[in-house]
Structure formats: structure tokens, C-alpha cells
Amino acid sequence: MPSTRKKVPFQIWAIGVSSLFLTCSAAMFFSVFAIFLSSIGLSIKDISLIDGIVEGLGYLFRIVSGFVSDYLSRRKIIFAAGSLFTAISRIIVCISMTSMGAIAARVLDRLGNGLQSTPRDALIGDYAPKGARGFCFGIRQALGTFGSALGTLLVITLFYLNADKFELVFSIASIPALLASLIIIFLVKDAPQHVKRVFLHKKVLLLGKNEIYLKKVALLGKNFWFLMVVVVVFFMSRFSESLIILYGKKAFSLRNDQAIWTMMVYNTVWAVSAYFSGPWVDRVRPDRLMYLGISLTFMANIIFITSTNYIVFLLGVIFWGLQIGLMQNIFCTGVANASPRELRGTSFGIYYFFTTVSILIANIIGGHLMEYVAKAAFAYGAFVCALSCLAVFLTNFLRERR
């Protein structure tokens, strides 16, 4: 790992630190968002539907930002705009402490997240040296997740000091988002863009600056599309963390601060998993790591089904955090490796499109199941994990048969 660490450019660290501040702000907002909506009368089914729709909108904006960043050959300006939208959303929710105000702020937050996520990942792919991409994505993810843990800790502290003062949490959450915007504006730079020849399928195609058409998506090749098949199936087993926390809160009568502590444990495990799994992704066959990540997800669902006390439930949360850190590194590195530089924003946009559809379906199904028979939602998740293993096997078999 030491030699790999020397290969990491300064831009990766700058992007990582900006992600730390953005996720710190996001954690402060999302740690109390579901609890806040629940406290003003919304049901778990309503919150699940809101989660799915709003997350879906955010991922759709990721698609648009990916295409635009490739078309303009400029990623930084979109990245910076997204972070500013995030900061503004925190201010909006402070002004209107109602369900509509909170939902409007959440929509703006997801707009900002959607605008900044795709150019951010494409920039990492642009700057990361080949052979160290898994480590670079791991750094970004680890710093971002550490920011989530830090934001959660701040929320817990504020709750202890101010007895569930939601307004204070939302207002303080705007500060790290503004700091992230300053880092992006002054320290992050666009990678040099060049007109170059891309060799794919024994054809030579000239990709010029500001020339991006849907027909060029064919350049992404079979490896990319095989990866997308696995992405679609796997993400249909992934509920939002809000559902898991609300289940724990309901099943084990957790106080608000205890529920937020659970989120902190989850984020800490995610950060550790993201950082240490990065070098694995660079060295180990992706399909083997996918089997490991899917197995961790399966085990998390089984633990949730069989948990009879909070300690066992927390073990499931730990497994959930481990798989997210690993699988995010696998997928992001796979997308970067399977796409030419000039189409990297587009490829990440397509990746986020498929995750959008899958996450929306998973949240709607999981929310309805959890409303009536909570553990049935985790049984569904475990079943889809088994289908994910089958998808990995079949796509790997077809790839090797080519």
C-alpha cells in the first residue's frame, strides 16, 4: 500500500476533503430528517416513498451532469454548483420547519448531490493512475464516509445539549457545505482534456472536445454493460439507510440519540471498509470481490431477520456498512476502467441511472413490506442478493466465452 499511496495526486485529496465536508453536512441533515418527518406525523410508508422519489431525482440529475461534463469537457463548474445547492438547501429547511419545507430542501439537496457526484467521480477517474484507481476511489469514499460519521457525532452532541433542536442541526449543517464549495472553487481543477484517438473493437474513432452523442455510448463496450447488469440486480436489494434506522428504532424502542449512534457506527464501518478495500479492488478479480460484497449484504439481511435485541441488530448494521464500502469501490473502479476518458462522465451518468431505477424499486418494495411485516423486507433483500450472485456468475461466464 505505501507505493500505491505515493501515486495519489493532490487533486484526489482535494476532492476527498471536499467530500468530507459535504458528507458531514449531509449526515447532519439526514440523521434527523426521517425522525423529523416522523415527529410531525408522516408514516414509514410515506417516508419510504419520499426517500425513493427524491433519491431517484438526485440520481437522474447525476445522469444529466455526466453528459454535460463530457460535452463541455468541464467538470469543476458543475461540481462546484452542486455543492452550493447543497448549502442553500440547509438554509431553506431552517426557514420553513414544516414537512413541505423539509421535502423541498431535500429535493434541492438531491439536486446538488446529483450535480456534483458524477463530475466528481469522473474527475477521480481522470486523475487516478491506472492500477491505483481502486485506492483513489477508496480514499474519496473513506474521507466522505468519515465526514458522515463526524456529522453524526455533531448531531448526537447537539441533541444532548439542546434536546432535539432540529432547527439548530439544520442551520449548523450549512457550514461544512459552504467550506466544501470553497475547496472545490479554489483547489480543484479540471483534468487536461485532449483530442485523442480511442481504440476499441479494432476501430479508430476521433473524439473531439465538445462532441458527445448518444451513439458513442456504444464505445463503452460489453464489459461496461455486463457490469451494469450486476449493478441493476444488486441495487434492488439495497434499501435506504433511513429504513434500517427506522426499523431499529421501532423494533427496539430506540431513543433519537440511540438511533443516531447507530448511524454513526454504520458510517464509521463504511469509511474503514472503503479505505482498506481500495487496494484489494486494484489487485483482486472483480467477480471474486463481488461475491464477497453480496455475501456480506446477504448476511446483513439474515441478521436483521433473526435479531431479537439491539446488539444483534447492530451487528447487521456493521455488515451493511462493510458491504457498501466494498461494493462502491468495485463499481466505481469498474466504471472508470471500462470507459474511455472522453466518455467517463457519460458512463458514470449511465451507472447512476441504473442505480436510480433499482434503488427506487427497492425502497418502494421495502417500505411497503416494512409497514406491515417488517422482517419480510429483509427476506426480500436476501432473495435479491442470491439473484445478484447469479448475475455475477452469468456475466462472468459470458465475458470469458467471448
Image (cartoon, rainbow, N blue to C red):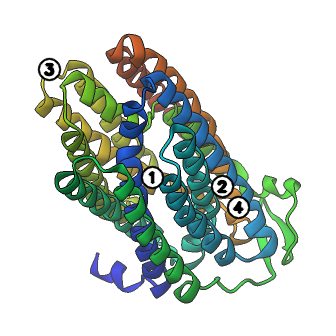
Q: Give the residue at the far top of this rendering.
A: 372
Secondary structure under tag 4 reads helix
Residue type highlighted by circle 3: Thr
Name the spot of residue 204 as percent of width and height, x first.
85, 70
Distance in Å between CA atoms under marks 4 and 3: 44 Å
Residue type highlighted by circle 2: Arg
Instruction: Name the disc covering residue 308, or none.
Output: 3
Report which residue position mark 1 lands on. 328
Name the spot of residue 172 as percent of width and height, x first.
38, 65
Residue 318 in the figure: left or right of residue 301: left
Q: Residues within 10 Å of mark 1 (few under 14, many from 20)?
A: some
Mark sitting earlier along the chain (1/4): 4
Q: How many marks?
A: 4
Residue 134 sits above or below residue 362 on the image: below
Q: Which quarter of the image is occupied by the C terminus?
A: top right
Q: Are marks 1 and 2 in contact (CB under 8 Å)?
A: no
Q: Are marks 2 and 4 in contact (CB under 8 Å)?
A: yes
